[in-house]
Image (tube, rainbow, N blue to C red):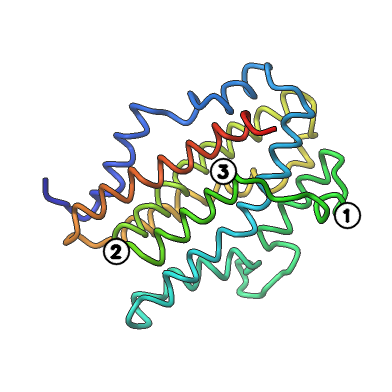
Amino acid sequence: MTAPSNAALEYAEALLTRSPVSENPYLRSLCDGVMERDEFVRSQRQFYFAVRFFSRPMAALTARLPDSSSRRMLVHNLAEEHGLAEDGVFEPAMAHDRTFVEFLGTLGVEAAGVATTSEESPVRAFNLALLGACTSESPAFAFSCLGVIEYMFADISALIGAAVVRRGWVAAEDLVHYKLHAEIDKRHAAEFFHSTGTRDSAGIFAGVEFGHHIFAGFYRSLIASP
């Protein structure tokens, strides 16, 4: 199998057609009304650690790339993770870990409560797997892995945002973090997929499969954790 320029995107779309994010047990439980509010809040307190960590694998991949042209997209993405606004000014409150703490606040979790939450093994396993992909695998593999995670998260964010508003846990006008990511993460995914190039077709397809595997598995683990 050869890899055209949009191979990663096409492969990700085919994979997610066969295994849509809406069928993940975590999201199905939330959207079907089975998941209780307390369970959702507990799981989202764990998800904070994934949000906080996500820029670190990207930074590690950036350091491996040889020149400014190959690093530029990742640098811009990292800047957005840390609060870069459309006008080019950094707004600390827009950093993604901060907007997620704000989302937790709309669920009644105070910042002090976030600070005292302990990181559990499922989120640590996801974070370290992603870091390993970005430090040890080929750039094509790493970009594909990051791309499919962003692609999935756009749809996941839309599902979660709609569910928490529909179930009355968060008012529509107060919804933060997930509203933003539902809007921007398909663009981020396209940028990652474009950066894979065309030469390492094996790395491209393996990276998409790996990213899907670890992210879908992480969500499944969120309803199995103690």
**Quarter of the figure that contains the C terminus:** top right
Neighbour tally class for label 2: few under 14, some 14-19, many 20 plus, Cα within 10 Å: some
Question: Residue 143 in the image: x percent, y percent?
Answer: 36, 59
Residue in the image at 27% along x and 41% along y: 11
Callout 1 amino acid: Ala
Task: State the CA–CA distance, disc 1 to disc 3.
Answer: 27 Å
Question: Residue 107 in the image: x percent, y percent?
Answer: 82, 38
Residue ID for mark 3: 182
Residue ID for mark 2: 138
Residue in the image at 44% along x and 45% along y: 151
Question: Residue 5 in the image: x percent, y percent?
Answer: 21, 55
Looking at the image, which is closer to me, 4 or 43?
43
Rendered position, 166 above or below 6: above
Mark 3 or mark 2, which is nearer the start of the sequence?
2
Determine which quarter of the picture holds residue 66: bottom left
**Numbered circles on residues, count:** 3
Callout 3 amino acid: Ala
